Amino acid sequence: MPPGEWIGGAATGPEAGLPSWTGGWAGLAAGFALLAAGFPLSSLALFGLLAGLAAASGTPWWAAGALAGAATAAGHGITYAAFAGLGPPFLAAVTRWMPALAGPLEYLRDLLGRPGSWPLLFLLRWVGLGYTQVFWLLGATRSGRPALLAFLLLNDLLWGLAWTYGTVALVAALPAIRAWLTRGALALLAGSVLAGGWQLYRSYRQPQGAR
């Protein structure tokens, strides 16, 4: 089965037409936005699917990367707005529901309070741990200055372009792996959702059992 068939949910060859391609891109954009909002998805899996769809559709890497980066920035922006509207009580409720986040959030709170923290925040995006929670904190405390938010969202765009370039270049250099990359990415994506859901369940159940 051609890789495109796995991504769009239906045949996506030249005969399939624009709607199938559009559905594939829309699904990936939603995936990157949900990842940015804090859903347990694998960024590696999403970029694998993105590379497969870009190769199958003949889309330039920079266009696919711009989609990934823009969708990620949109997810972070929406998350910031949601936490800004709901305020500190909502952040405290999230922490009570998922106690494992208390430590990382406290560390990020300390980091955001340090002068000259921007370079560390830039690197945090590339490590991939805690970047979403930065937007939670900035929103809940309404301490996100426009310049800082623009810097963080631009970092999302650069991240999306860099990772897409790498994965698309891999597919271009080794076209035989395209189908396996897509299948592996789907398996990894499903695994990340299951593992993340299990961790959330355990995080919720542990304090309940302690009472």
Image (tube, grey):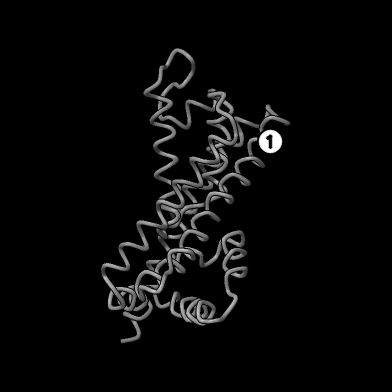
Marks counted in the figure total 1
Image location of residue 162, percent across then percent down: 63, 46
Tell me if residue 107 comes above or below residue 170 in the rendering. Answer: below
Q: Please identify the residue farthest to the top as the structure is shown.
A: 15
Locate the C terminus and report the quarter of the image it occupies.
Answer: bottom left
Amino acid type of the residue tagged 1 in the rendering: Ala
Residue highlighted by disc 1: 169
Tell me if residue 87 comes above or below residue 152 in the rendering. Answer: below
At 32% from the left and 62% from the top, the residue drawn is: 81
Q: Please identify the residue farthest to the front as the structure is shown.
A: 147
Image location of residue 152, percent across then percent down: 51, 60
Decide: few, some or many residues near mark 1? Use Cα within 10 Å; few <14, some 14-19, many ≥20.
some
State the residue in front, 194 or 112. 112
Q: Please identify the residue farthest to the bottom as the structure is shown.
A: 211
At 51% from the left and 67% from the top, the residue drawn is: 130
Q: Quadrant of residue 119?
A: bottom right
Q: Quadrant of residue 28?
A: top left
On screen, residue 162 versus residue 146, left or right, reads right
On screen, residue 146 versus residue 182, left or right, reads left
At 48% from the left and 15% from the top, the residue drawn is: 14
At 47% from the left and 53% from the top, the residue drawn is: 41
Tell me if residue 80 comes above or below residue 58 in the rendering. Answer: below
- Callout 1 secondary element: helix
On screen, residue 118 versus residue 99, left or right, reads right
Image location of residue 10, percent across then percent down: 41, 25
Image location of residue 124, percent across then percent down: 58, 65
